[in-house]
Image: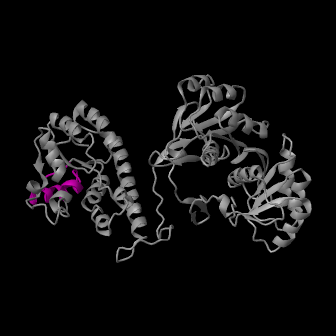
Amino acid sequence: MPKIHRVLISVTDKSGVADFARRLADLGVEIVSTGGTARLLRERGLTVRDVSELTGFPEMLDGRVKTLHPLVAGGILAIRGNAEHMKAVEEHEIPLIDMVVVNLYAFEKTAAREGASFEDIVENIDVGGPSMIRAAAKNYRHVAVVTDPEDYAGIADELAADGELSEKSCWKLAQQAFAVTASYDAAIAGTLSTIDVEGNRDENPLPGFLGIAAPRKQSLRYGENPHQSAALYASGEAGIAGARKLHGKELSYNNLVDLDAAWNLAREFERPAAAIIKHTNPCGCAEDDTQVNAYRQALECDPVSAFGSVIAFNRAVDSQSAEALADLFVEAIVAPGFDKEAFEILTRKKNLRLLEVGETPRTLVIKSIAGGYLAQTEDDVTAKTEDLKVVTERAPTDAEMKALAFAWKVTKHVKSNAIVYVRDGQTVGVGAGQMSRVDAARIGAQKAVLPLQHTVVGSDAFFPFPDGVEEIASHGATAVIQPGRSKRDADVIAAANRLGLAMVFTGIRHFRH
C-alpha cells in the first residue's frame, strides 16, 4: 500500500496512543484527531489537526457528530488506483486518510454498570467509530485500520522500515476490525433486547437476541477425535477459556472440556477441595481442612480412572499436594495459582499442563444443535440445609446431613442419570450417565474401591420406583438425598422406611446432559 501520510486517531481507550502517535509523527505522518484524544496528544507535545479543521464543520450535538462527513468518509474509502475516485478526490478537495486508529465507546462496561440509566446506555452506542472502522477495513488495500492498542508497537516497527505496511498486515488488521464491529453490534443488540421502549429492564435472564461473537483464541490439534477440526473461541481472561497456561503441552479440545468440568466442581466448596475428572465426570472428589488430604481422599475413590485425568483445586496448589501428585499421570491441573515450590515440583513433568484460573463469572450455558443454539442459565442453585424436607420416619444424623450436603454438590456435576455414594466429604462410588437410575446405583457401587458401609447417596433426580433405594441400601448406604416429586414418592418413601434409610427431598433437580 502507499506510504502513510495522514492518520485519523479517535480512541476511547487511550492507553499507549500518545507514544504510538509520537512514533508516527517522527515518521512525518500528519495526525488528525477529535475531542479528548486531540487534547491528550497536544498535552504530550504533539501537533494535531482537529477533524473539524479537515472537514470545515464543527463537532456538534454533544459530540454525536464529529466524523460523519463526506470528507472523512471519502478520504478513507477512495480507491487510490481508481481514476474516477481520484478525479472526485481532486474535484472535491478530499484529504486522503491512510490510517484510521479507532476504538469504540465502552458500551459493554456502561451497560453492565450497576444503576446505569437507559440514557447512559444509549449514549454509549458509538456511531462514527464503527463507520470509520468498517470503511477503512473495506478499503484495506489502501488504508490501515487499527482497533487494538496491543498492535501499536508492531505497526510502528513495520512503518519505521520504509513508511509502509504490507498488504498482509493490512488484511490482518481489517479482519480484526470487522470482528470488533461484529462483537460490538452483538453486545448492543443483546443488551437492547432486554430493555423496553421506556427503559425498563426485562427480568428474563435470556436475552431476546443471542449474539455469539468471539475471536479464535487458539487452534487446537483436533477435536474430540483426530478426524475433527477444533479451535477455542474466547474474548477476555475469565474462566477456563481465559486461564493462563503456565507449563506443559498445548491444550486439547478434550482437556478444555474436562478442565471446565473440574473447575466448576472444585469451586462449589468453601473448604480446600480437589476434583478429579475423567471424560467430564468426577471419578473422585473430596474436601478437607488441608489440600493434600482432599486430594488423597479424592484419589482413593477411583485411582484406576484417575490415570490420565484432569484435576482442579479451589486453592493455590501447595508443595505437599504437588509431592502427592508426583506418582500419578495427569493430563492437566487447574487452580487459582501454584506456590513456588509446588510449581518447581510439577514442572519436572515436561508435558503436564498447568493452568492458573482467575475470575469465573456466571454466564449463559450455550450448546449448539443442528440449525440453532440452546441457551440456559447456569445450574447455580444449592440446596440449603434448612430447606431440605425429611420425608422418612428416621431423620439423618448430623454427620449424615453433612455428608448429604457434600453429595448433593457433587451429584450436580455428574452426567445423568447420576448416583453418588459419599462418606465424610469424600466420594466413594460414582454411577454416571446411565439410562436407568437403578443401573446408576448398581454401577456406582461396583466402581467403589472403599467400603460402602455407612455411606450416604446423592441422586440427581427422583427415584421413579423403590428398586433404586433398595439397590443402594443393599450396599450399606444409610441415607439419601434426592429431589422428590415422583408419582411414586409414597412407594419410595415406604421402601426407605422399611430399609431404615433416612431420606431428604430437595425439591431441586440437577440433570446434566
Q: Where is 87 relative to 450, above or below?
A: below
Q: Quadrant of the C terminus?
A: bottom right
Q: Residue at x 35, y 73 (%)?
A: 199
**Does residue 100 belong to the magenta stretch?**
no
**Does residue 79 belong to the magenta stretch?**
yes
View extreme (bottom): residue: 197
What is the span of residues highlighted in magenta in the rendered image?
Answer: 74-97
Q: Residue at x 35, y 77 (%)?
A: 197
**Residue 34 in sight here:** no
Taking the image as shown, residue 13 lies to the left or right of residue 219, namely: left
- Whole-percent x, y for residue 468 in the image: 86, 61
In front: 34, or 425?
Answer: 425
**Residue 371 in sight here:** yes
In front: 212, or 24?
Answer: 212
In front: 193, or 451?
Answer: 451
- Whole-percent x, y for residue 89 in the image: 14, 57
Q: Quadrant of the N terminus?
A: top left
- Whole-percent x, y for residue 249 in the image: 59, 32
Taking the image as shown, residue 198 lies to the left or right of residue 408, namely: left
- Whole-percent x, y for residue 198 in the image: 34, 77
Q: Where is 145 relative to 339, above or below?
A: below
Taking the image as shown, residue 182 lies to the left or right of residue 437, namely: left
